């Protein structure tokens, strides 16, 4: 619905509301792992994460399905090449 968006960073991700513009959530991974791609499923708690950066949190050929309410991955999709 374009009401919010997610940003990947080298040690986690951030979620921002568009109007009014403000950060509504931040996740910093303990191991300092980077996220190269983060995509939201509408405005719900489900995200798709792909590792990235110099110290990726996940392999770059896997899409991890992340539940933000439970703070854990509950599924993964593996590919032969980088996502």
Image: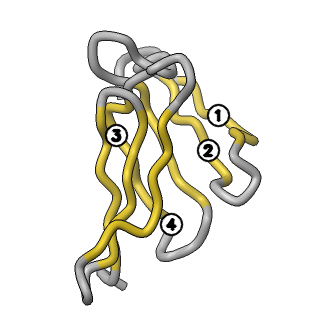
Q: Mark 2 points at which residue?
A: 65
- Asked if the residues shown at circle 1 and circle 4 are in contact, with their CB atoms under 8 angstroms apart, the answer is no
N-term mark: 3 or 2:
3
Marks 4 and 2, how far apart at CA: 10 Å
Quadrant of the image occupied by residue 12:
top left
Image spot of residue 4 (x, y percent) = 34, 75
Query: Mark 4 = which residue?
Result: 41
Residue found farthest to the top = 54
Q: Is residue 2 left or right of residue 56?
A: left
The Cα–Cα distance between marks 1 and 4, rounded to whole angstroms, is 15 Å
Relative to 54, is 65 on the left or the right?
Answer: right
Badge 3 crowding class, 10 Å Cα cut-off, few under 14, some 14 to 19, many 20 or more, is: some
Separation (CA) of disc 3 from disc 2: 12 Å
Circle 1/circle 2 CB separation < 8 Å:
yes
Q: Is mark 3 on a helix, strand or loop?
A: strand
Q: x, y (%) of residue 20?
A: 26, 87
Question: Compared with residue 52, is residue 38 higher up or lower down, i.e. above or below?
Answer: below
Is 7 above or below relative to 33? below
User: Is residue 21 or residue 79 the one in the foreground?
Assistant: 21
Residue at horizontal 56 percent and vertical 24 percent from the top: 30
Q: Name the residue under label 1.
A: 76
Q: Is mark 4 on a helix, strand or loop?
A: loop
- Sequence-wise, which precedes: disc 4 or disc 2? 4
Secondary structure beneath label 2: strand
Q: Give the residue number, with chain letter if any, for mark 3.
A: 37
Q: Earlier in the sequence, mark 1 or mark 4?
A: 4
What is the quadrant of the N terminus in the image? Answer: bottom left
Residue 19 spot, x, y in % from top left? 25, 88
């Amino acid at each position: 619905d374009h009401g919010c968006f997610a940003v990947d960073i080298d040690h986690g991700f951030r979620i921002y509301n568009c109007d009014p513009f403000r950060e509504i959530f931040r996740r910093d991974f303990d191991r300092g792992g980077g996220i190269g791609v983060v995509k939201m499923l509408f405005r719900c708690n489900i995200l798709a994460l792909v590792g990235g950066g110099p110290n990726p949190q996940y392999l770059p050929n896997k899409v991890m399905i992340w539940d933000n309410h439970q703070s854990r991955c509950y599924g993964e999709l593996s590919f032969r090449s980088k996502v």
